[in-house]
Image (tube, helix red, strand yellow):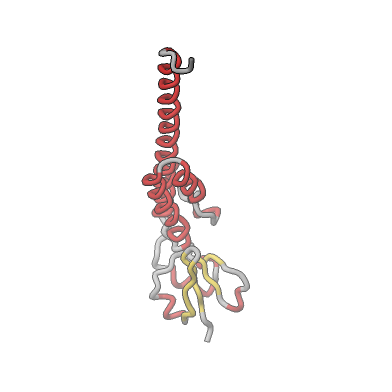
Amino acid sequence: MKKYYYSAGLDKFGPFTLDELKTKGISRETKIWFDELGDWKVAGSVPELKDLFKLMPPPVTSSMSNPDLLDHSSDNQPPKSWLIESILATLFCCMPFGVAGIIFSSKVESHFYAGRIAEANRASADAKKWTMISFWIGIAGVVLVIGFYAVVFIIAASSGEFN
């Protein structure tokens, strides 16, 4: 009996029989693997799984009015996760907002590979938002510190402290 595996981002689940796989709520975009397949494939492209999706409508594409929520499923690539940027913003800029960016960025790929494209796009947009907030607060903090020291230096110079 053939055993199937499916992937939700970096995690894989299985082995399952075809009947068990039907109960897992996979979508056409969920990655599937079994021995004869060779490499991971999108479930909708595996002929023997087509019956799983006959009664399921195709995924709804996002509105073109919001570019952060565009449907990236056609190129089989998840939206930008912002993980590296979030980590750097956390380390060098503003920790609380950077951590929020890390939390959202960690959800992007797991949502995408589980077939939840809209949630992946939303998590990507939220990760970008919190990373940018962290970055700009960090920049503002650096500018304020430099300004403070410049004022202190000017006051000290004008009062003759350096003589």
- Identify which residue, 162 or 69, lies in the foreground: 162
Residue drawn at point x = 45 percent, y = 61 percent: 110
Residue drawn at point x = 47 percent, y = 82 percent: 17
Up/down of 26 relative to 144, above or below: below
Give the residue at the far bottom of this rendering: 1
Residue drawn at point x = 61 percent, y = 78 percent: 36
- Would you say 77 lies left or right of 22 here? right
Looking at the image, how many numbered discs can be counted on the residues?
Answer: 0
Up/down of 92 relative to 17, above or below: above
Up/down of 131 relative to 49, above or below: above
Q: Residue 27, image x and y in percent?
A: 44, 65
Q: Residue 127, image x and y in percent?
A: 42, 47
Q: Is residue 150 visible?
A: yes
Q: Residue 151, image x and y in percent?
A: 41, 20
- Identify which residue, 36 or 137, lies in the foreground: 137
Q: Quadrant of residue 38?
A: bottom right
Q: Residue 64, image x and y in percent?
A: 43, 42
Q: Is residue 63 visible?
A: no
